[in-house]
Amino acid sequence: MRDSTENKTMKRFLACAITILLSASYAKAQLNAYFVNVGQGDAIYLEFPNGTNALIDGGPSGTPIYEFLKSKGVTKLDRVVLTHPHSDHYRGLKKVFNAFDVKAYYDTRAENVDAKGDNNLRELAAAEPGCKTLYPEPGTNLDWDKNVTVKVLNSCTEAVQMHDNDEMNNCSLVLRVYYNGHGILLMGDAESSIENAMMRIYKSGLNSTYLKVAHHGSRYSSSEKFLARVQPKVAIISVGKDNVYGHPHKEALDRLRAVGAQIYTTLNGTQSLTIPAPKRGVELTLDGQLQFGDVTSTAAPAFNMEERAFEPADAEALRQLKEAEAR
């Protein structure tokens, strides 16, 4: 009788141990994305199933992203990405380079002639021991995790100097991260002209469960046709409270609602999502959903989204994207 009882106890112990090990294995095999509350700016932190990580943009100042990464126990960043050279995306990365071990830096070749911060980052990356600087071309897949497809959909990989804000926005390094049947589309600040071009090039390859809404919810992005192609179930807007731009604009919010997307913002704090390991199911949950009621937007002249998609100011970014398509 005693042997039987001991056997049963041992079997229960082994079953519990196996369950714990499997749970830990599945937890490691999930993909986590954090849309960090950095105020009026962007910062996205990704944890991949293979244990590596990536930081995409750093927000307008160093403290918020530094404190977030420290709270996660981060000491090393396998990849740091600057989507485009605007201060609400690059300033926070200066502190990141000074405080963490960075292994690879991804950038466009767009030069903001009215700012030195983007050049400072390139200098910091060059001085970082063992850090590679890369300029990925549209249409290429990044080797970040063998089980995750990370595709570059847009970037300016030819050197170009710019004053125009729209042109810099349209040089945004756009990424689609795909895992376990679900895509996360990270749009940077790309505007409608780039959305239009990407629709022609990638077609159904834009379809994504999660959309990091372009340009903080600007009216000049997230066009109706683009959203119809992406079909997002969840839209995340990185935005600062009472910002001078009036982001997110009502027009963009209305278009997101019309396509059936649940809208979340960083106004109430950092948003996070998890895509579990295969066969574990996917729950479309984020923390701190904010339901928008009446949203006021700043006054703006009437515009036609279809006409704006081909404005001459977008010529350089569009030219490079079309050349990438032809290769």
Image: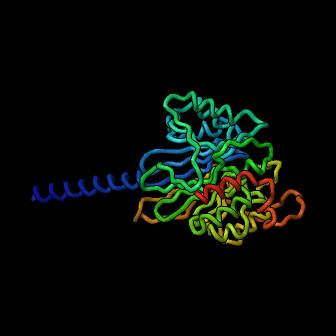
Total residue callouts: 0
Quarter-of-image position of residue 289: bottom right
User: Where does residue 52 sit, x and y in percent of width and height?
Assistant: 46, 44
Seen in the picture, residue 262 relative to 271 is either above or below; the reply is below
Q: Is residue 49 left or right of residue 198?
A: left
Quarter-of-image position of residue 295: bottom right
User: Where does residue 236 sit, x and y in percent of width and height?
Assistant: 65, 58
Quadrant showing the N terminus: bottom left
Q: Residue at x 31, y 56 (%)?
A: 19
Instruction: Give 88 or 17, whichever is nearer the viewer.
Output: 88
Q: Residue at x 47, y 49 (%)?
A: 143
Q: Residue at x 71, y 45 (%)?
A: 39
Instruction: Give 303 or 245, whichever is nearer the viewer.
Output: 303
Seen in the picture, residue 162 relative to 225 is either above or below; the reply is above
Please say whether residue 35 is visible from this viewpoint: yes
User: Where does residue 242 sit, x and y in percent of width and height?
Assistant: 80, 49
Q: Residue at x 83, y 48 (%)?
A: 244
Seen in the picture, residue 268 relative to 65 is either above or below; the reply is below
Q: Is residue 7 left or right of residue 292?
A: left
Q: Is residue 80 left or right of residue 259?
A: left
Quadrant showing the C terminus: bottom right
Please say whether residue 27 is visible from this viewpoint: no
